[in-house]
Image (spheres, rainbow, N blue to C red):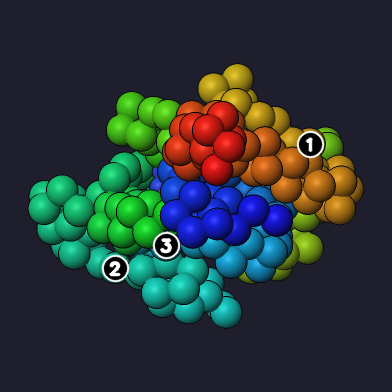
Amino acid sequence: MLNNGSNSLHGLKRKRRGLMVVLSSPSGAGKSTLTRKLLTENSNMTMSVSATTRRARSGEQDGVDYYFVGKTEFSKMLDNEEFLEHAKVFDNYYGTPRAPVEAALADGKDVVFDIDWQGAQQLTQAAGDDLVKIFILPPSKRELETRLQTRAQDSANVIARRMAKSEAEISHWAEYDYIIVNDDLETAMTELRTIVTAERLKRRRQLWLGPFVKGLIEGR
Ligand code: 5GP
């Protein structure tokens, strides 16, 4: 293992650009489970916690799952340009607070975003090169419906509306860099890990390579 002072492989490797990983899917495609697993496995990765005007579901925690805010507070945040992106989904407003994302990226951390296609489009304009967009598809419509019913967090009425909306969400699949069909959770997880690894290895993201290769050539 190379470890010779300023050109040490370990020291240099810290100098990389953080990824912005966007995960979108229709509700019930398994996105939350995959996201949770990815974060558990990667200590250098953090979740962007969105603000929303929707009510908390049972078990959801303010500041962990979302920042649950009123419409007035959301509007104020919007006016103060506190959001990196925002959108209306179903009947509620959702927005990604800008400051924590900028702080995490500056700290060399990867940031994961659980946002819809509207948010992904806005981040494409705002973030460009740092962005990796992944879309998760369910294996079938029937399976999607079953998963929404098993979740049992929403009323039948809400489930029906989410099913109707899923078609609109899925229609944006081609705007994403990667597509994962979540039929088997372990396979989907392996695919997700592979995408993150490959994206981290992209030359332009490894800012440490220039000095490292210079050292290699000069025999240091
Ligand atoms: P849910 O209410 O089920 O938690 O989320 C509904 C939808 O809103 C999901 O597709 C989720 O990805 C999306 N969403 C959550 N937070 C944000 C956000 O900050 N911005 C955008 N554009 N979409 C979001």
**Residue under pointer 2:** 69
How packed mark 1 is, by other alpha carbons closer than 10 Å (few <14, some 14-19, many 20 or more), is some
Foreground of the two, 17 or 119: 17
Please report whichever mark, 3 or 1, sits nearer to the chain's N-terminal start: 3
**Residue under pointer 1:** 181
Q: Position of residue 180 (x, y in %)?
A: 74, 36
How far is mark 3 from mark 2, CA to CA?
12 Å
Say whether residue 3 is visible.
yes
The reply to whether the C-beta atoms of the residues labelled 2 and 1 are less than 8 Å apart is: no
Please report whichever mark, 2 or 1, sits nearer to the chain's N-terminal start: 2
What residue do we see at 69% from left, 64% from top? 41
Q: Position of residue 43 (x, y in %)?
A: 58, 66
SS class of the residue under badge 3? Answer: loop
Q: Is residue 119 above or below residue 71?
A: above
Foreground of the two, 60 or 6: 6
SS class of the residue under badge 1? Answer: strand
**Number of the label disc, if any, that sits on residue 196:** none
Q: Is residue 165 left or right of residue 108?
A: right
Nearest to viewer (mark 3 / mark 2): 3
Say which amino acid is labelled 1. Answer: Val
How far is mark 2 from mark 1, CA to CA?
33 Å
Q: Position of residue 10 (x, y in %)?
A: 57, 57
Q: Quadrant of residue 24?
A: top right
Q: Is residue 63 left or right of residue 199?
A: left
Please report whichever mark, 3 or 2, sits nearer to the chain's N-terminal start: 3
What residue do we see at 42% from left, 29% from top? 129
Nearest to viewer (mark 2 / mark 1): 1
Say which amino acid is labelled 2. Answer: Val
**Number of the label disc, if any, that sits on residue 49:** 3
SS class of the residue under badge 2? Answer: loop
How far is mark 3 from mark 1, CA to CA?
25 Å
